[in-house]
């Protein structure tokens, strides 16, 4: 097994919506979800966010509508048969123009969202081609800089949801020396089937950043417990996840069997947290959890805590 690499990973910029990761070239229409300064298709530095592109289209329509309104008003004034008719036409034109500007300002955000949805739907194939181009760049980057390749896959994975991309990310992460100060992810990387690399990654996350281990990750580990036990470090993985689960009483209630089996192997601070939680909330203990935890406490910690109290 090759030694793990010490790397630095840039923080992941999270967005409210996945489409906010997309940028499009104003010149050739090529889409990308990466952070390059120039379009990889035409080489121009004309990339804009999808929202900016939609806003630009709406603004063009606004200018067009205003232009036609002005032209119609001017025509009405020009063809007026008298000064009174011309003045009336001018007054009506100004009122219509003011009303149009008011309505357009009020509806701009709504129209932008409609245009964005329409644009993304119409450009679906172009978006797919752009992401495929990004994916091809990952293979090239991986030869030179695996940390960069992971960062690129992380961006692609925010738009494309499949196990192949998730597994590639996990494989790269497991080739790095992970640290608690890294911006790591877990939920977006969960797979539909058992994978050794993912189980090992979850175990490492449970040790480094237990706050990332939530119900779906614990359920994954509980589902594939038998498979994990066959790994050389299976007990350590299961113990780390069980220890992370005792952070919340909700997880203690949801996964009593898993916690029962590995409570004995937990670090002392994690075990005592579990013990005290069950003391405070005995109703959370199910399936013999309280009895098992009590036995472990009596065997391993009762005497030491009795000495402290004395």
Image (cartoon, rainbow, N blue to C red):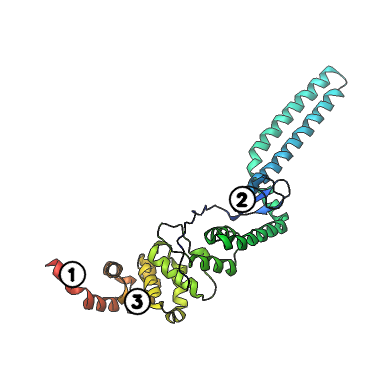
Q: Which residue is mark 3?
A: 262
The answer to whether residue 119 is seen in the rendering is yes
For the residues labelled 3 and 2, the Cα–Cα distance comes to 47 Å
For the residues labelled 2 and 1, the Cα–Cα distance comes to 59 Å
Question: Between tags 3 and 2, which lies in front?
Answer: 2
Q: Is residue 119 above or below residue 82?
A: below
Which circle marks residue 305 in the picture? Answer: 1
Across and down, in percent, residue 155 comes to: 57, 57
Would residue 28 appear left or right of 296 to someone viewing this image?
A: right
Q: How many marks?
A: 3
Would residue 306 appear left or right of 134 to someone viewing this image?
A: left
Residue 97 position by quadrant: top right
Numbered disc 2: secondary structure: loop
For the residues labelled 1 and 3, the Cα–Cα distance comes to 21 Å
Disc 2 crowd rating (10 Å Cα; few below 14, some 14-19, many 20+) is: few
Numbered disc 1: secondary structure: helix
Disc 3 crowd rating (10 Å Cα; few below 14, some 14-19, many 20+) is: some
The answer to whether residue 111 is seen in the rendering is no
Residue at 40 percent of width and 73 percent of height: 237
Q: Earlier in the sequence, mark 3 or mark 2?
A: 2
Across and down, in percent, residue 157 comes to: 58, 61
Which residue in the rendered view is the most extreme toward the left?
A: 310
Tell me the quadrant of the picture where the C terminus can be found. bottom left
Q: Which residue is mark 2?
A: 36
Q: Earlier in the sequence, mark 2 or mark 1?
A: 2
Numbered disc 3: secondary structure: helix
Q: Is residue 122 above or below residue 259?
A: above
Q: Earlier in the sequence, mark 1 or mark 3?
A: 3
Residue at 67 percent of width and 61 percent of height: 132
């Amino acid at each position: 097994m090759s030694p793990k690499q010490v790397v630095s990973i840039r923080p992941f910029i999270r967005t409210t919506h996945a489409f906010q990761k997309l940028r499009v070239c104003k010149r050739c229409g090529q889409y990308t979800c990466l952070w390059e300064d120039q379009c990889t298709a035409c080489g121009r530095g004309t990339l804009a966010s999808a929202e900016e592109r939609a806003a630009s289209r709406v603004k063009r329509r606004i200018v067009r509508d205003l232009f036609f309104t002005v032209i119609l008003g001017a025509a009405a004034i020009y063809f007026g048969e008298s000064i009174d008719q011309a003045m009336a036409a001018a007054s009506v034109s100004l009122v219509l123009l003011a009303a149009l500007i008011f309505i357009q300002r009020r509806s701009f955000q709504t129209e932008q969202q409609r245009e964005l949805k329409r644009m993304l739907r119409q450009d679906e194939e172009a978006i797919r081609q752009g992401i495929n181009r990004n994916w091809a760049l990952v293979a090239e980057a991986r030869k030179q800089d695996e940390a960069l390749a992971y960062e690129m896959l992380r961006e692609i994975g925010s738009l494309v949801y499949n196990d192949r991309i998730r597994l590639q990310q996990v494989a790269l992460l497991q080739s790095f020396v992970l640290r608690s100060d890294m911006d790591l992810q877990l939920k977006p990387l969960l797979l539909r089937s058992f994978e050794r690399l993912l189980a090992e990654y979850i175990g490492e996350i449970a040790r480094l950043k237990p706050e990332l281990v939530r119900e779906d990750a614990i359920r994954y580990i509980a589902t594939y417990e038998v498979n994990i036990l066959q790994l050389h470090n299976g007990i350590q993985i299961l113990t780390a996840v069980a220890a992370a689960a005792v952070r919340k009483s909700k997880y203690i209630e949801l996964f009593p069997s898993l916690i029962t089996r590995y409570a004995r192997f937990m670090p002392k601070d994690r075990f005592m947290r579990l013990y005290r939680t069950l003391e405070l909330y005995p109703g959370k203990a199910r399936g013999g959890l309280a009895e098992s935890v009590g036995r472990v406490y009596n065997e391993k910690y009762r005497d030491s805590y009795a000495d402290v109290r004395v």
